[in-house]
Image (cartoon, rainbow, N blue to C red):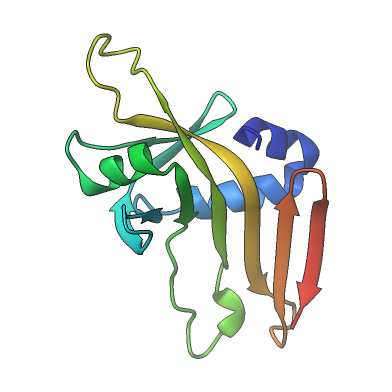
């Protein structure tokens, strides 16, 4: 697992597109695991700063409890529907999988953190070809690098 900055260093153009999709909308979707192993999805905000992808949660939230119990997570960018008249207008979507590492909040020392850095295991970018007749999937994994598929 690596911090977000390692993805940017390894594949700057790919990382910039992923980040652009995540930053295009305030709300993202976070997938965590409940104690019994079943999945849970929650809305969340995320930020890219200082080479890290960061998440913040309210104390007592179920997603906070989930990550403290099992740090595995997946984060999905907001998805928008393309115009019926112009399917190529779809900007695509991005997903990041990894582990949440709880970190102290420098602005509130001594408080229970509820802040996490995401250590990245996989990054996926999905978009349409030009012209828009095929789906393009790009996936980056540390040690394997970037791969691309068309469907």
**Near-viewer residue (106 or 18):** 106
* Residue name at image x 20 percent, y 43 percent: 61
Image quarter for residue 129? bottom right
**Near-viewer residue (24 or 103):** 103
Residue 30, relative to residue 102: is it above or below?
A: below
**Near-viewer residue (112 or 27):** 112
In the picture as drawn, the residue positioned furthest to the front comes out as 36
Residue 76 locus on image (x, y percent): 47, 58
Residue 58, relative to residue 77: is it above or below?
A: above
Image quarter for residue 113? top left
Residue 75 locus on image (x, y percent): 47, 53
**Near-viewer residue (94 or 35):** 35
The answer to whether 83 appears left or right of 44 in the picture is: right
The answer to whether 145 appears left or right of 8 in the picture is: right
Q: Quadrant of the C terminus?
A: bottom right
The answer to whether 28 appears left or right of 137 in the picture is: left
* Residue name at image x 31 percent, y 52 percent: 35
Residue 80, relative to residue 106: is it above or below?
A: below
Residue 84 locus on image (x, y percent): 48, 90
Residue 146 locus on image (x, y percent): 80, 54
């Amino acid at each position: 697992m690596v911090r977000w900055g390692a993805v940017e260093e390894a594949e700057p153009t790919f990382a910039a597109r992923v980040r652009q999709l995540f930053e295009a909308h305030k709300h993202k979707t976070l997938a965590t695991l409940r104690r019994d192993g079943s999945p849970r999805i929650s809305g969340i905000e995320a930020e890219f700063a200082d080479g890290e992808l960061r998440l913040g949660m309210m104390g007592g939230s179920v997603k906070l409890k989930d990550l403290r119990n099992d740090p595995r997570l997946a984060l999905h960018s907001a998805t928008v529907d393309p115009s019926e008249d112009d399917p190529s207008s779809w900007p695509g979507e991005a997903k990041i999988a990894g582990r949440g590492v709880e970190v102290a909040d420098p602005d509130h020392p001594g408080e229970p953190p509820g802040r996490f850095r995401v250590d990245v295991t996989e990054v996926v970018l999905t978009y349409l070809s030009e012209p828009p007749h095929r789906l393009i999937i790009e996936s980056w994994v540390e040690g394997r690098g970037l791969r691309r598929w068309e469907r």
